[in-house]
Image (tube, helix red, strand yellow):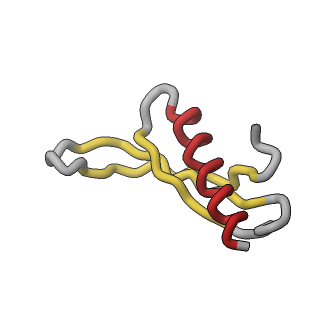
């Protein structure tokens, strides 16, 4: 649940996997809303495929937890 953070915006771009395959990814930019760490920003990158939002959400929640533990 996004009670500690919100998504600011997303960028779509091409990327290359380690095997040389071209893929599309999304850079999801977010801001932490609650203390500790309120106002801190971050970005996660996920492959742009159906269901990417669930993966992005899990990555953002992990980064928010890390940010909060450092403050």
Residue farthest to the front, as pictured? 69
Residue farthest to the bottom, as pictured? 71
Depicted 31 relative to depicted 51: above or below: below
The quadrant of the image that shows the N terminus is top right
- Residue 12 falls left or right of residue 23: right
Nearer the observer, 35 or 18? 35
Q: Position of residue 15 (x, y in %)?
A: 31, 51
- Residue 51 falls left or right of residue 23: right
Residue farthest to the top, as pictured? 50
Nearer the observer, 67 or 32? 67
What residue is shown at x 19% (from left), y 42% (from top)?
21
What residue is shown at x 25% (from left), y 50% (from top)?
16
Give the quarter of the image for residue 2.
top right
The quadrant of the image that shows the C terminus is bottom right
Depicted 13 relative to depicted 1: above or below: below
Q: Position of residue 52 (x, y in %)?
A: 50, 34
- Residue 12 falls left or right of residue 17: right
What residue is shown at x 55% (from left), y 47% (from top)?
59
Give the quarter of the image for residue 8.
bottom right
Q: Position of residue 35 (x, y in %)?
A: 84, 65
- Residue 14 falls left or right of residue 33: left
């Amino acid at each position: 649940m996004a009670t500690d953070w919100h998504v600011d915006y997303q960028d779509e771009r091409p990327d290359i996997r380690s095997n040389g395959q071209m893929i599309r990814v999304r850079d999801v930019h977010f801001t932490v809303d609650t203390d500790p760490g309120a106002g801190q920003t971050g970005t996660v990158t996920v492959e742009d495929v159906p269901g990417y939002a669930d993966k992005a959400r899990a990555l953002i929640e992990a980064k928010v937890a890390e940010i909060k533990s450092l403050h």
